Amino acid sequence: MIKAGIIGGAGYTSGELLRILVNHPKVEIDFVFSTSQAGKPLTAAHPDLIGETGLVFTDKINPDVNVVFLCLGHGKSKAFLENNKFALHTRIIDLSNDFRLDNDADFNSDSFVYGLPELNKNKIAAAKYIANPGCFATAIQLALLPLASENLLENDVHVNAITGSTGAGVQLSETTHHSWRNSNISHYKAFEHQHLAEIKQSLNSLQEDFENEILFIPNRGEFTRGIFATLYTKTSKSKEELIDLYQTYYKEHPFVWVTAEDISLKMAVQTNKCILSLEKKGDYLLVTSIIDNLLKGASGQAVQNMNLMFGLEETTGLKLKPSGF
Amino acid sequence: MIKAGIIGGAGYTSGELLRILVNHPKVEIDFVFSTSQAGKPLTAAHPDLIGETGLVFTDKINPDVNVVFLCLGHGKSKAFLENNKFALHTRIIDLSNDFRLDNDADFNSDSFVYGLPELNKNKIAAAKYIANPGCFATAIQLALLPLASENLLENDVHVNAITGSTGAGVQLSETTHHSWRNSNISHYKAFEHQHLAEIKQSLNSLQEDFENEILFIPNRGEFTRGIFATLYTKTSKSKEELIDLYQTYYKEHPFVWVTAEDISLKMAVQTNKCILSLEKKGDYLLVTSIIDNLLKGASGQAVQNMNLMFGLEETTGLKLKPSGF
Amino acid sequence: MIKAGIIGGAGYTSGELLRILVNHPKVEIDFVFSTSQAGKPLTAAHPDLIGETGLVFTDKINPDVNVVFLCLGHGKSKAFLENNKFALHTRIIDLSNDFRLDNDADFNSDSFVYGLPELNKNKIAAAKYIANPGCFATAIQLALLPLASENLLENDVHVNAITGSTGAGVQLSETTHHSWRNSNISHYKAFEHQHLAEIKQSLNSLQEDFENEILFIPNRGEFTRGIFATLYTKTSKSKEELIDLYQTYYKEHPFVWVTAEDISLKMAVQTNKCILSLEKKGDYLLVTSIIDNLLKGASGQAVQNMNLMFGLEETTGLKLKPSGF
Amino acid sequence: MIKAGIIGGAGYTSGELLRILVNHPKVEIDFVFSTSQAGKPLTAAHPDLIGETGLVFTDKINPDVNVVFLCLGHGKSKAFLENNKFALHTRIIDLSNDFRLDNDADFNSDSFVYGLPELNKNKIAAAKYIANPGCFATAIQLALLPLASENLLENDVHVNAITGSTGAGVQLSETTHHSWRNSNISHYKAFEHQHLAEIKQSLNSLQEDFENEILFIPNRGEFTRGIFATLYTKTSKSKEELIDLYQTYYKEHPFVWVTAEDISLKMAVQTNKCILSLEKKGDYLLVTSIIDNLLKGASGQAVQNMNLMFGLEETTGLKLKPSGF
């Protein structure tokens, strides 16, 4: 059994990680670290875990676990790792954005690998440290990687994406107050979202000369889970060529599905899937990309990375029941 | 024109009051008092008022206005009135629960009148001070007053009611976080809700001997506005007698409507109406009562009281477009 | 009083028209025509009208009314007018898309005027027949008219807009089944929405040489009311110049408001407003445009047109309480 | 492997059954029968099954499967079984209400067993035919069985429960139109819901003399999944005695959890759990009971029954990730 430790156990991504790991056949949760919740049962912060676990939050880490998941706020993972030492063999998967960019990746004479399995599967399998991608970044990259892999990104890319309220985290705020959020929509950080950096880094790792703009408007949706993204760019390839390109690219990747049918957000919610729908409209390729922001966009992908790192079947513990409704 | 002052201008009830008063043909908003917002435009706290008003929050009161609405938290109105003096002629309408019970009603050698127009219309017209009823209390009382008026309450009353998230106020809290509240339901203060006291006081003012229990479960709904209440009690009266009783009781009250048809919450939302649907099921009378918690349950009723106090048509400024959807 | 007839009374746009007209101080509803509902009270189809009106649906028209609103499905208005004659003085306001394009506008040796008051106010005031704009078309045009008025549209325009479920009409369908729609998002008719034709027609009426593409993705949102649209295009004008341009353009138009603040959908819902927020991002102008699809996007705009045609203040009957939440 | 056939594959309960069975380690889906969908892939009716199965709907049954699930409308199962014969060894689990009452249970010189494992575990394990309980019936019975098991039901029981829109089935209807259902609440069949019969039958099987009334108001909620029920009745037992009674009763039942903490609906959604929260309020026991109507209230319970019938661990295939949000 893989002994796992979770750091920062009271937030949404750690809660979702726990929901997966309590049923993962190869993992034993060794400890869940939370200074604010220490001594309380996990169900105090995640009451839906009733009947799943009797574990209690702790403020002590076990430095000898096989894998540690860092579920801390952005900017806090680095500081935590500097102040807390783990065994040489311990793998670390960080869900924040602290180590995602190449410039930030060096650590302990080793390097964080960007944990997008559909881009870096072999590197992940060999990695000691993983920087788990951002949620928007995952949905957008998976919609563009096949193009970049063939140097087909030749024009600006226009992206509109909408995320559920869990994307904003567990902290209370005006824009997550139910009275405000319900039946409402707004956008934020238009053209300036921080995930653009990791997206461009990944695309350039495949298509070095890609320098066009990615014009990205992120929106706040009134649902709780999921990201629904539409992307379009000009390309001379036909619809058939494009579908073939995408299906070929994702042939060995069990969580990405390519279709020419219409799709809707809930098809991906509660699963670790990314579903891509392709349309050709005049000169434009229009890709719709859907994921669950807490699963393929965070904790599910973290477990997928862990599976790869420990030589398990990539889908272990991640064959989740779709929600349907 | 009636000059109105509003105390505590950043909350939901004051926002709703402003939305009504900006279109009220007989009212001029003289000042909106908020220590936290002083100097900012009203639209800083209530952005949907864009284009409706150029007013700015102030931390100075004008003691000479014709009417003051107190939109402060429960327990704060009394203290405010002790520290701030208004002109002798100034009418005061308090939306908190500070003065609703007879034991609390005395003030300044005068007395607060309980501002439920369907119970106290004449007293309200003559009052200087009004204690505006609670939202649940309004929905429940209007469903029972006709029975009490004929001494027909002879058994326990079973009440289940569900309220929108605006009922919990503008403060951030775990149970108003969108991620938690959306698609969720829970109950709170079962059998112990504070509105029971004012409900019983009103019923006893009509039917002195009523001593049965009112078993009331309040629920948190995932919508933002409205209260949907079902109440049942045993009675030997027939359905026809009951409908006749209710319609007669509310004949002179322009906001309460009695029907034998099925009703649903949104029929009352965005209006100052209370709609009552009556069914007879075996020995039981089942009443469904719906209101908008911010209108008939708070700010709309406050304006209705103001209209009565100043001799205006009761519906002035309150003929609001139903939302339909 | 203006005597009004409504044709097709059981749908969403006629329901909303009725909700406005029951409180309009200068209008008397003469008849509401519906073959499917004839003989039933209006409240059978629109139960929230309880207490507002005792009117009954009819299958007979009164050809002598002052104004007729056609609330029929697209393609049915023309046929209806051919089979039913009205008095010479009767004004007709059609809410379908039958007469919106110049090629379709001729009728009875007269012509339908495109009823967007912010484009055609004087023509509307003099018109006998009005083709009321589409909902998406209204939100998008109001975001672009000031640019076109100064020949400033020089590049492609990228539009993403999301509409509530009332936009799909009262008919039952899989994509309006609550189990499917709730917490879901999808898009439809990408780059091919039928409103593009009327949008281009209006823009070309101001800027004849505009030939760039308008790339428009319409989305189905899970809320019931409202359209939230984001649009961007390249322009060399500064943010200050643009805000000045927009505010100047809309100075005499009481329902359009221009701001540099962030906005969210619910600020416009339940009102006849269109609120525009402007940002400059590098070379791009980003406009966010919000309306209520049933009000400014349909029935509210129809009443606004009626007001202009009969010489009333443009806002008569349309000073609606914002919903806030 | 257990070969399973599903009859009536296009509805909500069969979709949910498929979502469970595609990941069930001991089941192979042999056929999915649907006359309306024959020849189409399962994903045509259940698009979220993309990547889970390549199966195609059929209009031919395989009479030799090990288990058949009937997911037909109420009243259609009996007719189907009369017209279609299965092998002697084939177990049948019917999700309709055709065989739930003892008077209806006889079939083929055998008898349907009421498939509530927490009442009838041993009978289910030995049964050939199972009548799967109703969704409301499950939530309500599980809240009352421990009392009945000790003959402690001595007074009327007051029940208010609210269900998601999937409870109304896949058919289109006015009360499942999103524009109507969203942010709305209504009730139906008050005091007369058909599930009362099976509830009373189960209670009387434990407490023969129970003859008090169960006053049950079912409500339509705006969420899609889940039932939230509150029940109260008078009892002289203390809170501690009651919690002990309930925990003892459910000790061997892996899906029912008893707590004294507050609970909310989403704790049970997407799981096969029933969570019961107990409070003592004066003389009253108040029980809150939550389930997912499609899982513990339908398809999950059907699989639980199948597991028992085939000697599998009761939780096989049913350790589902909670949704949390």
Image: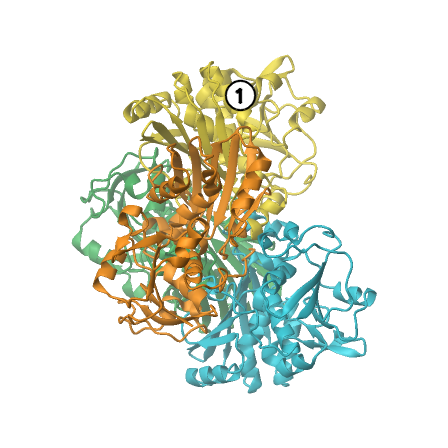
Chain colours: A yellow, B cyan, C orange, D green
Q: Is residue B231 left or right of residue D57?
A: right
Query: Compared with residue C270, is residue A150 higher up or lower down, i.e. above or below?
Result: above
Horizontal and vertical percent position of residue D189: 39, 68
Query: Compared with residue C92, is residue A44 higher up or lower down, i.e. above or below?
Result: above
Q: Residues within 10 Å of mark 1 (few under 14, many from 20)?
A: many
Q: Nearer the viewer, residue B246 or B303?
A: B303
Give the residue at mark 1. A114
Q: Nearer the viewer, residue B222 or D218?
A: B222
Horizontal and vertical percent position of residue C29: 39, 71
Q: Nearer the viewer, residue A285 or D243?
A: A285
User: Which residue is outermost to the right?
Assistant: B83
Q: Amino acid at mark 1?
A: Tyr
Is residue D241 in view from this perspective?
no
Pointer 1 indicates a residue of which chain?
A: A
Q: Is residue B321 left or right of residue B25?
A: left
Horizontal and vertical percent position of residue C324: 56, 55
Query: What SS does tag 1 mark?
Result: strand
Toward which corner of the image does residue B211 lie, by quadrant? bottom right
Q: Is residue A305 left or right of residue B27?
A: left
